Amino acid sequence: MIKVLVADDEPLIRAGIRMILTSADDIDVVAEAANGREATELARAQRVDVVLLDIQMPVMDGLTALAELRRAAPDARVLILTTFGDQQNVLRALSEGSAGFLLKDSAPAELMGAVRAAAAGDAYLSPGATRHVVDSLASGRSTRRAEQARRRRLETLSGRELEVLALLGEGLSNADAGQRIHMSEATVKTYVSRILAKLNCENRVQAALLARDAGLGN
């Protein structure tokens, strides 16, 4: 059973997430918090596998709580709950060790899938939000940055790896990328892990930005 802590200052949001997640046989919402401080205290008091963490909360915001959670519950995986307008906070959260991000208006199946992926040790980046973040940041990046990205060792990637990297640049999930190039989701996941290691990227967003800077993808 995957034990989940939901941290959001809006009771209706928490209730909706609880209703969705507890409908699954393998997920249980064991605690709820209305701010970051409560979240860290609850995570310290009981074992949780996944924390769904809102960024904009009173008392202690989600980004501050993320750092506290990394110390209080190092084994818990933290998924950031976000909106389309929160790109900079998303990137900061990813750089500080979150397991990914999920849009608050995601479909129930995506919410459950994200929790399962995080619990399994995988990163989860909402496909729609990934493309939005990448497009927003890429539009403001300098020519020097683009040149630096192109100089990174893309030549170390195989043709197939470059193809998968281009799909990351489009913000596709592993499943969607697999359908595009007729490859299983598990195989795409293996390619993504290999790409991240070769390019020294910490997560899919960094790889996607690199792909866009290098002119890969649509």
Image (spheres, rainbow, N blue to C red):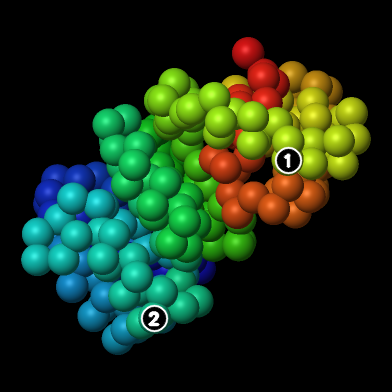
Q: Residue furthest right?
A: 158
Q: Is residue 190 left or right of residue 1?
A: right
Image point (36%, 82%), residue name: 72
| Residue 165 coordinates in the image, percent (x, y) | 72, 32
Q: Quadrant of the C terminus?
A: top right
Q: Is residue 187 left or right of residue 133?
A: right
Q: How dense is the environment of label 2, judged by Cα within 10 Å: few (below 14), some, or many (20 and up)?
A: few
Which element is circle 1 on? Answer: loop
Which element is circle 2 on? Answer: helix
Which amino acid, mark 2? Arg
Residue at image mark 1: 152
- Is residue 172 at least partly visible in the picture? no
C-alpha separation, residue under disc 2 versus residue under disc 1: 33 Å
Seen from the viewer's position, the closer of residues 111 and 152 is 152
Image point (61%, 61%), residue name: 120
Seen from the viewer's position, the closer of residues 188 and 110 is 188
Image disc number at residue 71: 2
- Is residue 100 at least partly visible in the picture? yes
| Residue 2 coordinates in the image, percent (x, y) | 48, 66
Figure check: 23 above or below 169: below
| Residue 123 coordinates in the image, percent (x, y) | 57, 52
Figure check: 143 above or below 2: above
| Residue 56 coordinates in the image, percent (x, y) | 18, 50
**Foreground tag (2 vs 1):** 1
Q: Residue furthest top?
A: 218
Image point (27%, 75%), residue name: 40
Where on the picture, by quarter, is residue 184?
Answer: top right
Figure check: 193 above or below 158: below
Seen from the viewer's position, the closer of residues 30 and 147 is 147
Q: How many marks?
A: 2
Seen from the viewer's position, the closer of residues 30 and 50 is 50
Which amino acid, mark 1? Arg
